[in-house]
Image (cartoon, rainbow, N blue to C red):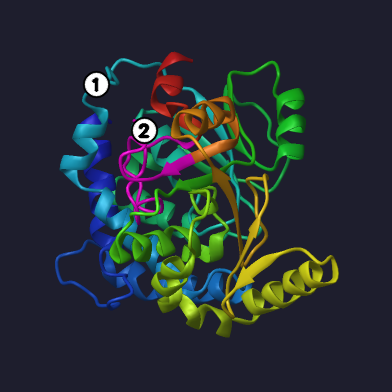
Amino acid sequence: MNLQQRINAFVKLGDFLSQFSNESIHIKNNVEHNDLFFDGFKHQIKLAEEHNGWFTKENILFALEGWSNLLTENNLHVWLKPYHIESIQQKKIAIIMAGNIPLVGFHDFLSVLITGHQVVVKQSSNDKYLLPFLAKYLEYVEPYFKGLITFTEEKLEHFDAVIATGSNNTARYFEYYFKGKPSIIRNNRNSVAVLFGTETPEELKKLSDDIFRYYGLGCRNVSKLFVPRGYNFNAFFESVYHWHPIIDKAKYANNYDYNKAVYLMSEFDMLENGFLMIKEDESFSSPIATVFYQYYDSLDVLKETLNSKKDHIQCIVSNGFMENEIPFGKTQKPELWDYADNVNSIEFLLSI
C-alpha cells in the first residue's frame, strides 16, 4: 500500500466522522460502509459517555468534529509534503495512550499508520471505546490495514519503538522500562495565557474555550494566566460567564466545591464567580474549576521565565507576545503539524 492509498483511507475516515458533530448527528448517503458502522458508532459514543463521566457527549462530538476537519486530502498532503515516506522499512510501533480527553492518542495512531508502520496500541481504561471502532472502519475502507493494527491490554512485547504518554511518575517508569528502544516519552505539561489588559471581550471569550473545553483536563487547556500587575479581572469574568452551565455537571461541581472548601479553610486569597476560581499561584498545574494567575512587571523578563520553563509548557496563548504563540480559542483545535511537546513524531517515525 503506497502513501496515497493510506491518505485516501484516512480521508474516508474523516468523511465518516463528519456525520458526528454537536450541531447534529446525521447520516450522509455518500459515506462508505454506513450500513455497517453508523449506528454502531453512535452506540460507541454512548458507551464512552457512560463509562467516563468526563466524556460528555458534547466533548466527544467536539473531538470527532475536530478530527473530521483535519482528515482532508489537502491537510494530509500539506502535513506530509516535507517528508520522504515511500521508502521506509516497516517497523512495529507501540503506543501507550493517555485517557484524559476523547481520542487524545489519535494523532500518534495516525502518524504511525500514515508513515507505513505497524501499530500496537495500549489504551487507557478511561478511553477504550472510540478508537478500536474507528480502526475497524479503516480496515474496511482499506483492507491492507488488516494485520497492521493491534490493541492489547497485556504487557507490550516484540516492538521496535514506542510512543508513551503519562504522568510525571509514569514517564520516569517509561524512560527506565523502554531505555533500550527508540522512544518518545511525554509527561505532564500545562498551557498558559499571557494577557496585556487590552484584550477585547471577544478575545477573552475565546480564551474561555481554552480554559473550559474538556473541563480543563487536556494539556492544551489553559491552566494559568500571566497578567500585568494591577490587572482588573472584571472583564475576564464577564467574558467567561457564558460557560456557567458547566457547574451543572456533577463531577465538575464536586471538584469546584471541594477545592473551594480547601482554599477557604486554608485562608487562601482567591476570586470566584460561582463556577470558576482564580488564585494567585506560581504553579502551572491548577486543579479542576481553578485557574492560577501570576503578575508580571516586564514582558521581556516574562519571556525569559517562560523560555526557561518550556519543558513544562504545552501552549502559550496570547496575541503579539512571542513567536509560536497560539491564538485565543485555538488550543483545542490544533493542526496536524502541531506536535505534542514540540516533538516531531513524523521525523521520529522516519528515523527508526
Q: What amino acid type is highlighted by mark number 1?
A: Pro
Residue bearing mark 1: 82
Which portion, as a residue range, is magenta?
315-340
Judged from the image, the secondary structure of the residue bearing numbered disc 2 is loop
Judged from the image, the secondary structure of the residue bearing numbered disc 1 is loop
Q: Residues within 10 Å of mark 1 (few under 14, many from 20)?
A: few
Residue 141 inside the magenta-drawn segment: no
> Taking the image as drawn, is residue 62 in sight?
yes
Q: Tell me, yes or no, whether the two marked residues, 1 and 2, touch with CB atoms within 8 Å.
A: no
Q: In the figure, residue 9 lies in which quadrant?
A: top left
Coordinates of residue 324 in the picture (x, y in percent): 35, 33
Coordinates of residue 331 in the picture (x, y in percent): 40, 50
- Measured in 3D between alpha carbons, the distance from the residue under mark 1 to the one under mark 2, in whole angstroms, is 25 Å
Q: Main secondary structure of the magenta part?
A: loop
Residue bearing mark 2: 322
Residue located 37% across and 62% down the image: 204
Residue 147 appears left or right of 18: right
Coordinates of residue 21 in the picture (x, y in percent): 31, 70
Residue 324 inside the magenta-drawn segment: yes
Q: Which sits in the foreground, 199 or 33?
A: 199
Residue located 70% across and 72% down the image: 255
